[in-house]
Image (spheres, rainbow, N blue to C red):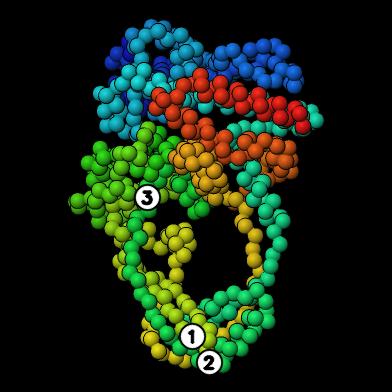
Amino acid sequence: MIVCICEKPSVALEVAKVLGARTKKDGYYEGNGYQVTWTFGHLCELKSPDKYYPQWKKWSMSVLPMIPPQYEVELINNPGIKKQFKVIKDLYKKADSIVNCGDAGQEGELIQRWVMQLAGVKCPVKRLWISSLTEEAIRQGFQNLKPQSNYDSLFEAGLARAEGDWLLGMNCTRLYTLRYGQYKQLLSVGRVQTPTLAMIVARDNEIEHFVPKPYWTLATKYRDTVFTNSSFQTQQAAEEALAVARRSPLIIKDVLEKRSSEQPPQLYDLTSLQVDCNRKFGFSADTTLKNLQSLYEKKLTSYPRVDTRFLTDDIYPKCPGIIANLTDVCAGARPLVGRQLPKSKRVFDNSKVTDHHAIIPTGDTRNLSTLNDFEHKVYDLVVRRFCAAFYPACEYANTTVLANAGSLTFKVTGRTILSEGWRAVYGKELIDYDSQNNEKVTLPSFKVRESGQHTPSIEKKMTTAPKHYTEASLLLAMETAGKFVEDETLKEAMKENGIGRPSSRASIIETLVKRDYVRRDHRNLISNPAGRNLIAQIHSTLLKSPELTGQWEHKLRQIERGSYSLQDFMQELEHQLVTMIKEVQST
């Protein structure tokens, strides 16, 4: 009997259907020589400190650092998990072989390897690696099963991340709580959590200490069009300029028109989709991920936890069929049917894809009727973005009109759409893109040397503080955190991942809120006193900056490639930890 194990019951059901395992048993499906079972995400976790040594149960400086001789896993203490693990273990005992159908990524590999480790698996194991749950993808995946050993380095990278986070989190949380919490407040410290919190606290401090300064702007209205001059630091200077403008007619000196084009936006990765859902609908990152996961399990979209915005070349022949199946879902799909789809490097690039390609619709629309409002909104964004990728660029003209009033120069700019291109897929729903691209009003026709009366005015304004982080802007900051790192090698590593993995950023934000370090105020994320106090107490620059994560991501990628070892990674981290502990204890 071949035992297949998936990460969720819903995924197991789809795999079982394709394999012909249609008999429902307690905790698995059976039939056609297969038994298909499942986990519930993580069934196992690294043991708590006291499971290694009893003296580690008490929070005391004397036991730090806590470095296990060998990291061990245990079942999560939950009756449902224990029951399902027994089912899995009993199936494994009688299995001729196993197919690991866990999510095709670092975390999915770790989940299933830990279960196999705890169950004492001895039989051969193959790996299913797919990016969607359509029947075609599952069938193709089973026709191309790989030896599990092909993914050993992926597992080791996941193990390094898990064990490293345990080592840093367990030790540093106790260290700072004991040293600065006075046994009253838990000071939770984590490799990703702490620098993310530090960014929010820094932004809030910047806002609180911001001192607004006045400035004055000079503008004039001519033919219902507002021309601007510049800003002035004093009211007197602004009034002097205003007097000059009032004494003279406005004369059009130049009309500059530059034709340009705007390429379609790239396909979604998880972070960019979370950003758009937060901006458009106010969805939290976690809400977007949960709805996207549901769409994946309903076979409507591809694998969600991805950090690339590209497709591989082998997806290109499938795109016309996907487009054809979306015509009832998206009007923008209809003009593409029957046409030769362009194959742009902005969309298809094998070198930019590792585990999974960008998030796209599968073309299977049979479960559309089951979607709730949230799922519909996320699905619509994914579908439109996919269709837009095959449209031509938007052609437009940027017009700049320069005018003089006496010795003063005024200017107005505008954009005129000449050919909608990909924008036709979105219609008028382009507020985000237009605001990012400084979309300007359409201008009337002006001729050089024309002149006339105008209405100049000055306006007093105040400089404004930076804006609080929203989930959208925080996700982008986490993704681009490498710009704060000076080391070029680490900066390059963080270009690919930033702070945390795309799949973990939502849970990091939720953890900060849950621990009362951060609160949601409408769409803003604002630090609470507990969060500010924690950051104030952490004197280690390394713990608060993105640099530590940059080091990790660089080394974890090397582990995945087989050019660096798990053992070396942990030894270096242990050395860093000992140094941190000594520094804190000596302050």
For the residues bearing labels 3 and 1, Cβ distance under 8 angstroms: no
Label located before the other in sequence (1 or 2): 2
**Position in image of residue 368 (x %, y %):** 37, 42
Secondary structure beneath dot 3 equals loop
Residue position for label 2:
248
Q: Crowding near pointer 1: few (<14 within 10 Å), some, many (20+)?
A: many
Residue at figure coordinates x 54%, y 78% from the top left: 229
Q: Are marks 1 and 2 in contact (CB under 8 Å)?
A: yes
- Would you call the spot at circle 2 few (<14 residues within 10 Å), some (14-19), or many (20 or more)? some
Q: Amino acid at mark 1?
A: Asn
How many neighbours does mark 3 have within 10 angstroms: few (below 14), some (14-19), or many (20 or more)? Answer: some
Q: Nearer the viewer, residue 228 or 586?
A: 586
Q: Earlier in the sequence, mark 3 or mark 1?
A: 3
Give the amino acid type for the residue marked by disc 3 in the picture. Answer: Gln
Q: Nearer the viewer, mark 3 or mark 2?
A: 2
User: Residue, x 35% and y 11% (percent of image)?
Assistant: 124
Look at mark 3 in the image and give the residue it sits on. 266
Left or right of 535? Residue 91 is left
Q: Whole-Å distance between the Cαs marked 3 and 2?
A: 49 Å
Label 2, secondary structure: give it.
Answer: loop
Residue at which label 1 appears? 404
Q: Amino acid at mark 2?
A: Ser
Label 1 to label 2: alpha-carbon separation: 9 Å
Disc 3 from disc 1: Cα separation: 41 Å
